[in-house]
Image (tube, rainbow, N blue to C red):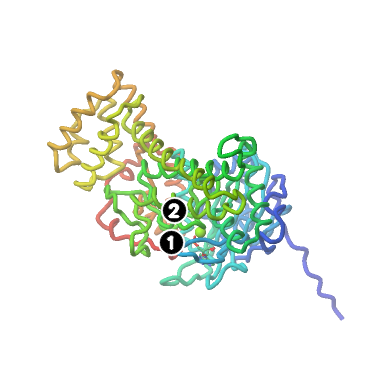
C-alpha cells in the first residue's frame, strides 16, 4: 500500500505585515475563499514605483513565485482571502445583490503609505459571480493597470495597480480572449453599494458596524463634528459628498469619463474605482458617451456631476436608518451642490493659470468650453498648447486648433487681460497642470495589441509616460499628438 501525501501548499511571502482589517467586520460581510489558479502566468507589467512605495521588493515580486502570487495561483503567507458582498443601483435601477464576482481581497498590510488593502481582480468565481466566469481579459486588465496609474500621475484620487499578469487560459467574451489578473491597492475598496446592501435588508446592526468601521478608520473627525446636529453619520455622509464632489470636479477638468458610475462603482473614500469602459476625451464633446453599452447616455461626460449626486442620494437613503432624520440626511447631501461647482471652478482657474478668483471667471471658462465644443477641438492638446502660449510661445499652434478663429481671438483677448502680470510663471504653472500625456483609447489599444503578441514593452513604456504626464519626454512626442482616425471607431463596452 502506498500513501499519497499531498505536498504542503506553497505560500509566497510578500514581506509585509498583515492586519485584520475588513475581516473584523464579521462573516456577514464576506465569504472566505482562495483565488482560483491560472495556468503558467506571466508578468505583463509590474509597477515598480508603487512596489517600492509600499516597501516591497520588486525582484521578489517579479520572481516565478511572485508572479504566481500576483495571479492568485499560489497563496500569500499571512493573507486571509475573502470576497466581499455588496449590492447597488446599476444604470439607475436597483440591481440587488452584486458583490466581488471576480475580485478577491487578500487582506490589509502595513506599508509606508499607511495600511493598504491588496485585491486581485480576475481571480476566479466567487459566490457573487452570478452568471459571470470570475475572470477578466488581458485587454481590460491592461486598461485598468494603466488607467489607474494615469490618474495617480495626474494627482487624482484613485485605487492603484501593482501589477498585471496574464495567462493563455481562454476567456469567452464577444470572442475568445485570454485571462489576466490585476493586483489592486487602496486603503479600502468599500463602495456605496456595501452600505446599500445592508440597508436594503434592514440589517441595521451590520449597517451601523460598517459605518462605524469606515468612520473610525477614515473619517474620525465626524465623531466630534458639531455640524448637522452633531450626528456622526450625517457628518460622514457630508464628508463623502464633499470628497466625491472634489473627485468628479477633477474628472471633468481633465476630461475623464468613467463610463459606469453605478453605485457599486463608487468608492466610499472618494477614489476613482473600477476602470471599465473609461475614456479620456479626445475631441471635446460635452455629450460624449464612452461606454458603448450605455445606450441612453446616462453616464455621458457632462452628466457625471449629476449622476454622482444621484449616487450620493442612494448612499443617503442607505444611511438614513442611522442618521434617523430626513432633514439632517438631506442637509448632509446639500454640500455637494456648493462644493462641486466651487471645486470645478478652482480646477478650471488653475488650468487657465489664474491665481485668484474673480466674479466673471465662470463666463471666461464657459466661453472657452463652448468654443472647444463647437469645433470639437482636442481637449488635452488645447490646454497644453494654451499653456505653451502663455509660457512664451506664439498664438499660432493654439489658434490653429479652431475653425472659428474670430471667436477664439475674441476670447483670447479677454483671457490675456485676465492673466496675472507674471505670465511666464503662469505658463510654467499651467504646464504642470495641463498634462501632455493622457491615456487615450488608441494608446492603450496599441499597447494591448503588442501585449497580445507577448511584447509587454508598450505597457511599461506607457506606464512611465503616464506616471509623469506633465514632463516632455521628447522621444514620445507622437503619443501626445492627435488620435488617428481609427481611434474614433474603438468600441469600449462593459464587456471586460
Ligand atoms: P462591473 O460592471 O465591472 O462593476 O461589475 C458589476 C458586477 O458584476 C460586480 O458584482 C462584478 O463583480 C460582477 N462581474 C463583472 N464581470 C464579472 C465576471 N466576468 N465574472 C463574475 N462577476 C463579474
Ligand atoms: Mg464594479
The answer to whether 168 is drawn above or below residue 117 in the figure is: below
- Respond yes or no on whether mark 1 lies under 8 Å from ligand 1: no
Left or right of 131 in this view: 432: left
Give the distance between the C-alpha atoms of the residues marked 1 and 2, in whole angstroms: 9 Å
Q: How crowded is mark 1: few (under 14 residues within 10 Å), some or many (20 or more)?
A: some
Is there any visible trace of residue 377 in the rendered image? yes
Q: Which mark is residue 362?
A: none
**Residue farthest to the right, as pictured:** 1
Q: Disc 2 marks which residue?
A: 310
Q: Disc 1 marks which residue?
A: 92
x, y percent for residue 43: 55, 55
Q: In which quarter of the image is residue 403?
A: top left
The first of marks 1 and 2 along the sequence is 1
The answer to whether 426 is drawn above or below residue 200 in the figure is: above
- Respond yes or no on whether mark 2 lies under 8 Å from ligand 1: no
Q: Quadrant of residue 7?
A: bottom right
Q: What element carries label 1?
A: loop
Is there any visible trace of residue 250 in the rendered image? no
**Residue farthest to the left, as pictured:** 406
Location of the N terminus by quadrant is: bottom right
CB atoms at circles 1 and 2 under 8 Å apart? Answer: yes
x, y percent for residue 132: 53, 70
Q: Residue shown at 63%/66% (left/top)?
A: 36
Left or right of 347 in this view: 484: left
Q: How crowded is mark 2: few (under 14 residues within 10 Å), some or many (20 or more)?
A: some
x, y percent for residue 357: 34, 27
Amino acid at each position: 500500500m502506498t500513501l499519497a501525501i499531498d505536498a504542503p501548499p506553497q505560500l509566497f511571502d510578500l514581506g509585509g505585515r498583515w492586519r485584520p482589517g475588513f475581516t473584523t467586520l464579521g462573516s456577514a460581510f464576506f465569504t472566505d475563499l482562495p483565488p482560483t489558479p491560472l495556468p503558467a502566468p506571466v508578468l505583463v507589467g509590474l509597477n515598480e514605483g508603487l512596489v517600492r512605495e509600499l516597501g516591497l521588493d520588486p525582484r521578489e515580486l517579479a520572481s516565478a513565485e511572485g508572479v504566481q502570487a500576483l495571479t492568485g495561483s499560489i497563496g500569500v503567507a499571512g493573507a486571509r482571502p475573502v470576497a466581499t458582498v455588496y449590492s447597488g443601483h446599476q444604470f439607475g435601477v436597483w440591481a440587488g445583490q452584486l458583490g466581488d464576482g471576480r475580485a478577491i481581497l487578500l487582506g490589509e498590510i502595513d506599508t509606508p503609505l499607511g495600511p493598504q488593502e491588496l485585491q486581485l481582480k480576475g481571480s476566479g468565481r466567487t459566490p457573487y459571480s452570478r452568471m459571470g466566469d470570475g475572470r477578466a481579459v488581458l485587454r481590460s486588465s491592461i486598461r485598468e493597470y494603466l488607467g489607474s496609474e494615469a490618474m495617480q500621475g495626474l494627482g487624482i484620487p484613485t485605487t492603484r495597480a501593482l501589477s498585471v499578469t496574464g495567462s493563455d487560459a481562454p476567456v469567452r467574451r464577444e470572442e475568445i480572449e485570454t485571462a489576466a489578473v490585476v493586483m489592486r491597492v487602496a486603503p479600502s475598496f468599500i463602495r456605496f453599494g456595501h452600505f446599500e446592501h445592508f440597508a436594503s435588508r434592514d440589517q441595521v446592526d451590520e449597517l451601523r458596524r460598517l459605518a462605524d468601521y469606515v468612520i473610525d478608520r477614515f473619517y474620525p473627525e465626524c465623531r466630534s463634528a458639531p455640524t448637522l446636529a452633531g450626528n456622526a453619520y450625517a457628518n460622514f455622509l457630508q464628508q463623502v459628498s464633499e470628497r466625491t464632489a472634489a473627485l468628479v470636479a477633477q474628472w471633468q477638468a481633465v476630461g475623464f469619463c468613467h463610463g459606469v458610475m453605478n453605485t457599486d462603482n463608487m468608492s466610499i473614500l472618494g477614489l476613482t474605482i473600477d476602470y471599465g469602459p473609461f475614456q479620456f476625451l479626445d475631441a471635446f464633446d460635452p455629450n460624449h458617451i464612452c461606454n458603448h453599452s450605455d445606450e441612453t447616455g446616462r453616464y455621458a461626460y457632462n452628466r457625471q456631476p449629476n449622476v454622482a449626486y444621484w449616487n450620493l442620494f442612494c448612499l443617503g437613503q442607505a444611511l438614513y436608518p442611522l442618521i434617523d432624520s430626513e432633514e439632517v440626511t438631506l442637509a448632509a447631501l446639500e454640500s455637494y451642490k456648493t462644493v462641486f461647482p466651487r471645486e470645478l471652478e478652482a480646477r478650471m482657474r488653475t488650468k487657465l493659470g489664474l491665481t485668484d478668483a474673480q466674479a466673471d471667471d465662470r463666463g471666461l471658462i464657459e466661453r472657452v468650453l463652448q468654443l472647444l465644443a463647437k469645433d470639437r477641438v482636442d481637449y488635452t492638446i488645447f490646454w497644453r498648447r494654451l499653456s505653451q502660449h502663455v509660457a512664451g510661445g506664439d498664438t499660432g499652434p493654439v489658434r490653429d486648433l479652431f475653425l472659428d478663429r474670430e471667436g477664439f481671438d475674441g476670447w483670447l483677448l479677454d483671457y490675456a487681460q485676465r492673466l496675472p502680470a507674471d505670465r511666464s510663471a503662469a505658463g510654467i504653472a499651467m504646464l504642470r497642470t495641463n498634462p501632455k500625456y493622457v491615456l487615450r483609447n488608441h494608446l492603450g489599444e496599441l499597447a494591448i495589441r503588442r501585449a497580445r503578441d507577448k511584447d509587454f514593452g508598450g505597457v511599461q513604456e506607457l506606464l512611465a509616460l503616464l506616471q509623469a504626464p506633465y514632463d516632455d519626454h521628447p522621444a514620445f512626442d507622437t503619443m501626445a499628438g492627435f488620435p488617428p482616425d481609427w481611434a474614433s471607431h474603438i468600441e469600449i463596452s462593459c464587456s471586460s
